[in-house]
Image: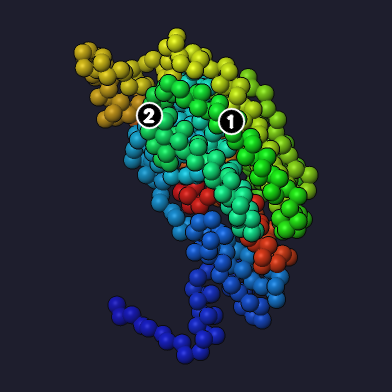
Amino acid sequence: MATQTIEFKDPAARASAAVAAASDDDIQDLKGDKLVLNMGPSHPSTHGVLRILVEMDGETITKAIPDVGYLHRGDEKIAENMTYNQFVPYTDRLDYLAPLANNVAYVLAVEKLMGIDGAIPPRGQYLRVICCELARISAHLLGLGAFAMDVGALTVFLHTFTEREKIYNLCESLTGARFTTSYTRVGGLTRDCPPGWIQAVRKFLDEVVLNIAESETLLTRNRIFVDRTRDVGVISRQLAIDYGLTGPNLRGSGVDYDVRKANPYLVYKDLEFDVPVGSVGDCYDRYLVRMEEMRQSVRILRQCLDRIPGGADNASREPVSIQDGKVTLPPKTKVLTGMEELIHQFMIVTQGVNAPPGEVYFGAENPKGELGFYIHSRGGGTPYRLKIRAPSFVNLGILPEVLPGHMMSDIVSILGSFDFVMGECDR
């Protein structure tokens, strides 16, 4: 079939055709006297490959349409062709600023499907909570640092990234990797924490609270930062609920909802912490909520370090995984000396853990909001269907409602306050 090339000699005609070709029916009315701009997908303040088609009346936004999918990799379809444990490394690539939290949320969904979610040894549960809260601090540090840098405060980014580097060092000691951790397994963890690791976490907590205070001193009463964030991007309580927002973006609008409190998992029900909420729902409130969440994470971590069974050196040799050869890999020494353990390892590695038929959904409180996994199983070692509820994807859905009426420069502040990651948005 022959192809036909159309050449536009008129620049206006070329621009009009580009807008029509780049969008669907929702964008067809973006033709007229108003200016249409493409923000992204290669814009530094979009925090990834996000494109926003913006209609402007002078300096005021009249319409905004987010265009996602530039980072789509088909993770959910990939999961259908892998065993449950084989998919753990793919969860690192969702919110890649908090891979440890993704690992934990995913395996908790699989364990709920298998009915073993309450059988994880206490030490393993405490280590998982420690991983989740370290990931929360790490993600918030980068999110706030990038937010501040977007509105002109470079020094804050240098402060927060210094502390985040220490978390990377802790991740490397614990998992063997700094970025893509793949630390959890169905039924437990890959390994216990190394000697001296818990003491290193205590030292980090003493240092990070000072860094949080310094960053807050630089921002909270900074005239430029306040002017760029206060009463900007206001999301009412009802609007946040209607659009399904979760995490700090929901709590910034005054909704007291945290999955760790509403539907406790692991040992969160035994820990004391507060859920910060905003009152106005603007960019400034979302900033304050994340600041306080980091302090609450430090509070949770200190309780976990004090209460973890086996203590810092695990002198009593508390297990971190279920002691079931059909769920977790048996010790290598027994695999090399016992036929039953060898068979169990062979079955788990080649066919995966044998999950029963059924459907489950599990949602965890991740740094960006509720990260949920829906699993439809027809039995065997691979899921028949897996669906990921990505908080960044849901949170970005409110942009067409929030952006109109603001100035072009306000887009940077609003996007920074949302703290999204396109890795989990596009999946």
Give x and y (percent) for residue 164.
53, 41
Q: Which mark is drawn over residue 205?
A: 1
Q: Is residue 240 visible?
A: no
Residue 39 placement: quadrant: bottom right
From this view, report whether residue 173 is shown above or below residue 115.
Answer: below
Tell me what residue is drawn at x 47 percent, y 25 percent.
Answer: 197
Tell me what residue is drawn at x 71 percent, y 55 percent.
Answer: 225
Give x and y (percent) for residue 8.
46, 87
Mark 2 sits on what residue? 379
* Inter-mark Cα distance, 1 to 2: 43 Å
- Say which of 221 and 25 sits in front: 221
From this view, report whether residue 203 is shown above or below residue 289.
Answer: above
**The residue under label 1 is which amino acid type?**
Leu
Q: Is residue 197 visible?
A: yes
Q: Which numbered disc, 1 or 2, marks the residue closer to the eye?
A: 1
From this view, report whether residue 163 is shown above or below residue 282.
Answer: above
